[in-house]
Image (cartoon, coloured by chain):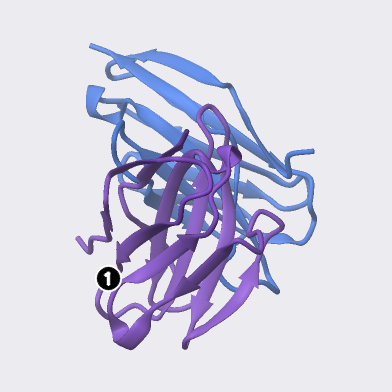
Amino acid sequence: QQKVQQSPESLSVPEGGMASLNCTSSDRNFQYFWWYRQHSGEGPKALMSIFSDGDKKEGRFTAHLNKASLHVSLHIRDSQPSDSALYFCAARRGSALGRLHFGAGTQLIVIP
Amino acid sequence: GPKVLQIPSHQIIDMGQMVTLNCDPVSNHLYFYWYKQILGQQMEFLVNFYNGKVMEKSKLFKDQFSVERPDGSYFTLKIQPTALEDSAVYFCASSPGGADEQYFGPGTRLTVL
């Protein structure tokens, strides 16, 4: 069973629209979460991390964490064609240095 | 920003041969990682490495796998002998500390025939 599950598998939004990506974990030991973005032919690049309940905003990107429900989301405001990529949620246990557990990813397509 | 390099980008070998994947991590980073991604599946942790030692490895890190970083040069993943199920994209990553953001390389696509 995958410990980090992402939805939807793919998402299309118009340029300028809002994209919302979801991530749920099944392990209550996961305390630290990251969102990574991967463009075709490249390695994943960290977008942002979130470790505390609530919202964290960085520019057009807002992450939300609810530890009680083990749910993390990423919202992209004013989506741009350059945001088209594969987005991964990754989780780490508090006791384990470094090891990240990745979800299967959400493919985001921003339509010009 | 900081970049992790991986050499080669593609490698095709026959089953049973040895292969070494090379990673040039970010220069001041102390933690190093290998992840495996089979086409269409999620990225899976293989191993992390710090201060010359393996810190943690997953079930995917078979006995045929080994890692090292001799004298601060490339961080390498060696597979000997290779098996068909080793075909995947292997990503190297590095981070300043064990709890910090991990910087990923572009990956090495390994095809075992």
Q: To which chain does the residue with label 1 belong?
A: B
Residue B17 against residue A76 in the figure, above or below: below
Image coordinates of residue A63 in percent, x first then y, are 50, 45
Who's purple, chain-wise? B
**In which quarter of the view is residue A73 placed?**
top right
Q: Amino acid at mark 1?
A: Val
Image coords of residue B94 (percent x, y): 39, 67
Q: Nearer the viewer, residue B111 or A77?
A: B111
**In the shown orientation, is residue A108 left or right of residue A78?**
right
So how many labels did they put on this image?
1
Q: Seen from this angle, which residue lies furthest left?
A: B1
Q: Residue at x 53, y 49 (%)?
A: B82
Q: Is B8 located above or below residue B47 in the figure? A: above
Residue lying at 23% horizontally and 60% vertically, measured from the top left: B3
Residue nearer the viewer, A15 or B109: B109
Do we see residue B98 in this rendering? no
Above or below — where is A20 with respect to A55? above
- x, y (%) of residue A71? 68, 42
Q: Residues within 10 Å of mark 1 (few under 14, many from 20)?
A: many
Query: What kind of element bears circle 1?
Result: loop
> Looking at the rendering, in which quadrant would you find the N terminus of chain B?
bottom left
Residue shown at the point (40%, 81%) measured from the top left? B30
Tell me which chain appears blue: A
Q: Is residue A49 visible?
A: yes
User: What residue would you read off at disc 1?
Assistant: B26
- Taking B82 as reference, is B68 left or right? left
For image coordinates 79% across by 45% down, the residue present is A26
